[in-house]
Amino acid sequence: MKKVILSAAALMIGAVAFAQGNDSSVESTGSNNESTVVQTGSIHNSVVQQVGTANISSVTSLGRNNNSKVGQVDERNNSTVMQSGGNNNSSRVSQGQISSNGTISRTGRDNTSLVTQTGNSNRSVVQQWDSNTSIGELNNSTVSQSGDANTVDSNQFGDRNTSTITQGSVARPANNNKVNLDQVGDSNRSTVDQSGSVTGATNRNVADIDQVGNLNRSTAISRSGDNLIVTNQLGDSNVASVTQLSSFNTSEIFQTGNSNNSSVTQLTGNGNDSDIFQTGDGNVAQVYQTGTDNTSTINSVGNSNVATNGQNGTLNISDVMQMGNSNTSTVSQSFNANTSSVTQLGNSDLSRVVQTGNMNQSIVRQSN
């Protein structure tokens, strides 16, 4: 066992840092572990703990009052943390976990984590492991935050999961955005991008992504402010995609089953709301909203149902209920204050509603 404790202007493993009031503790147990810590500025705190073989950790803090913790348990884990150009940033990476009593409770192998935070008061937590009896392997997580007061919680429990989160850039920073991501299973993929648009920064966006199962795919993109994205996937091979290019929009997708596909696009305008519920296998839902204060609800219970809602205008409402198999519903609303209700109770029903104008009402009920 080799233990190295370093403080201000002290020798680091693989690096030397000279700064005021910095503190670093590096502990390695095993063989061929590597750790590099560089601290430039004032009052940094870094803790690195490695248990196993051939783990690599690199921590760089440039600024003031930054805090970083890295824990790696088992073999060939790779963690790179860079907190540069900002103050009061906090980062924690856990690849495998050591329990409080000193025994190894969860292990990780061949996991990769890269965290880059540029700005002030950003917080990032990345956890990659599996259960007490299984090894979490080949997970990949990338977190990049440019701006102030952004928060990321990324949890990968299983094997071969991939997560990419970007909040802002140097040219278009992001502020007060939050991402909570949980991947439980194998080979899940998730991308969250809450970066600023060409015209400015993004602020106060929230993305909550939960994937439980295998081979699920989720994409969440916000380019403005005060948007909410909630995606919940329970099953295998589900696909969910949300793009928000304006402000005060809400999108919620709940998929229970296998091979369901949902996409939501909220373009110009503000205050649009989209809710998609898919229970079963092979259901497809698509929502396009351009305008202000439009509401779309799609609820598919069964298999191989297809629903498309397109809204262009203000205060349009579309409600689709499908209970059965192989039903198809298409709703198109243009201009203002149109209302459409479609209910399909049976199999292989087909409905198409087109509303062009203002204050139109449509009710469709199909059963067999």
Image (cartoon, rainbow, N blue to C red):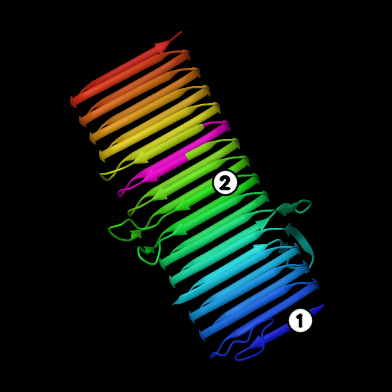
> Could one spot residue 234 in this view of the protein?
yes
Q: Does residue 185 appear to the left or right of 327 in the view shown?
A: right
Residue 189's tag is 2
Q: Main secondary structure of the magenta part?
A: strand
Which mark sits nearer the N-terminus, 2 or 1?
Answer: 1
User: Viewer-proximal residue, 47 or 54?
Assistant: 54
Does the stretch in magenta take in 184? Answer: no
Task: Classify 10 Å Cα crowding around label 2: few (below 14), some (14-19), many (20 and above).
Answer: many
Q: Does residue 110 appear to the left or right of 265 in the view shown?
A: right
Q: Does residue 135 appear to the left or right of 288 in the view shown?
A: right
Residue at 59 percent of width and 51 percent of height: 162
Q: Secondary structure at mark 1?
A: strand
Does the stretch in magenta take in 242? Answer: yes
Q: Does residue 66 appear to the left or right of 244 in the view shown?
A: right
- Nearer to us of marks 2 and 1 is 2
| Quadrant that contains the N terminus | bottom right
Residue 3's tag is 1
Residue at 64 percent of width and 44 percent of height: 187
- Up-down relation of residue 38 to residue 311 (above or below): below
Q: Amino acid at mark 1?
A: Lys
Task: Classify 10 Å Cα crowding around label 1: few (below 14), some (14-19), many (20 and above).
Answer: few
Q: CA distance from mark 2 to mark 1?
A: 37 Å
- Up-down relation of residue 28 to residue 365 (above or below): below
- Up-down relation of residue 362 to residue 367 (above or below): below
Residue 119 spot, x, y in % from top left: 42, 71
Residue 183 spot, x, y in % from top left: 60, 48
What is the span of residues highlighted in magenta in the rendered image?
Answer: 241-260
Residue at 79 percent of width and 73 percent of height: 29
Query: Residue pushed farthest left?
Result: 358
Q: Amino acid at mark 2?
A: Arg
Residue at 54 percent of width and 90 percent of height: 19
